[in-house]
Image (cartoon, helix red, strand yellow):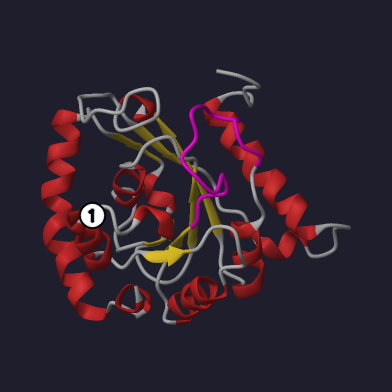
């Protein structure tokens, strides 16, 4: 795990540049992948992406929206089950995050990544869910954006519930669309009574514009 927590550096950048065109072509034909408003994401510099999370392959679909590798905070219970998975996530710089206690080490790594002018990915739902709205959004993405002062981009992922999800656990064809929503400036919420709650509510509002209202049940 210690290896995964370090800044992966140029090797990860190179592997991402090599793999991205291949994965993009495969996703376009196999998953009918469509990206909307991709021009909103900066080509360089630090920012935070905050997608919804329905499938194990959501990080791949979300990363295709960007032009640089995104280091995702990933729950560490996912690791240790598959050497291939561990190697792949390590290669692309995933940041393991423990569940059940404050992830101080993971947060420090995320902050250092942003300070190094690299983007970070955070899932406000905190875990893979069965449907949009199943889990209330946590404040982690808003907190990290407010602490570092970088913009927060909501990413609405549609269609990934049909591949490697709770309802469709197999790797199979699906039609996937990713919409980049306008960025949220964390400084706009500093004067609110609860800045984190207000910024997270804004993330939710922008996601609802694409995904529709929060569902109360499947």
Q: Is residue 99 left or right of residue 91?
A: right
The answer to whether residue 60 is visible is yes
Instruction: Kindly give the residue lying farthest to the top in the view shown.
Output: 218
Circle 1 packing at 10 Å, graded few (<14), some (14-19), many (20+), is few
Q: Against 58, is 210 above or below?
A: above
| Most foreground residue, 18 or 94 | 94
Q: Against 31, is 12 above or below?
A: below
Please give the count of numbered marks on the rendered protein.
Answer: 1
Q: Is residue 164 left or right of residue 214?
A: left
The image shows residue 63 at horizontal and vertical percentages of 32, 52
* Magenta stretch holds residue 129: yes
Q: Residue at point 57% right, 36% down?
A: 207
Q: Is residue 34 left or right of residue 134?
A: left
The image shows residue 145 at horizontal and vertical percentages of 60, 65
Q: Is residue 169 left or right of residue 96?
A: left
Q: Identify the image quadrant of the C terminus.
A: top right
Q: Residue at point 22% right, 71% down?
A: 13
Identify the residue under disc 1: 85
The answer to whether residue 75 is visible is no
| Most foreground residue, 89 or 214 | 89
Q: Residue at point 17% right, 56% down?
A: 84
| Most foreground residue, 129 or 177 | 129
The residue segment tinted magenta is: 122-136
């Amino acid at each position: 795990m210690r290896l995964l927590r370090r800044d992966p550096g140029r090797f990860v950048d190179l592997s991402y540049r090599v793999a991205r065109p291949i994965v993009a072509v495969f996703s376009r034909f196999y998953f009918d992948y469509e990206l909307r408003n991709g021009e909103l994401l900066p080509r360089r510099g630090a920012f935070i992406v905050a997608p919804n999370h329905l499938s194990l392959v959501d990080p791949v679909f979300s990363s295709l929206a960007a032009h640089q590798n995104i280091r995702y905070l990933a729950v560490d219970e996912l690791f240790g089950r598959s050497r291939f998975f561990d190697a792949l996530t390590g290669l692309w710089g995933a940041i393991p995050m423990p569940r059940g206690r404050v992830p101080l080490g993971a947060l420090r790594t995320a902050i250092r990544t942003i300070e190094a002018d690299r983007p970070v990915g955070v899932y406000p739902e905190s875990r893979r869910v069965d449907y949009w709205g199943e889990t209330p959004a946590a404040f982690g993405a808003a907190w990290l954006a407010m602490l570092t002062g970088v913009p927060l981009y909501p990413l609405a992922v549609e269609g990934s519930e049909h591949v490697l999800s709770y309802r469709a656990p197999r790797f199979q064809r699906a039609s996937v669309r990713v919409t980049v929503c306008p960025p949220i400036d964390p400084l706009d919420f500093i004067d609110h009574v609860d800045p984190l709650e207000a910024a997270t509510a804004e993330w939710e509002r922008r996601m609802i514009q694409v995904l529709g209202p929060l569902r109360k049940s499947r």
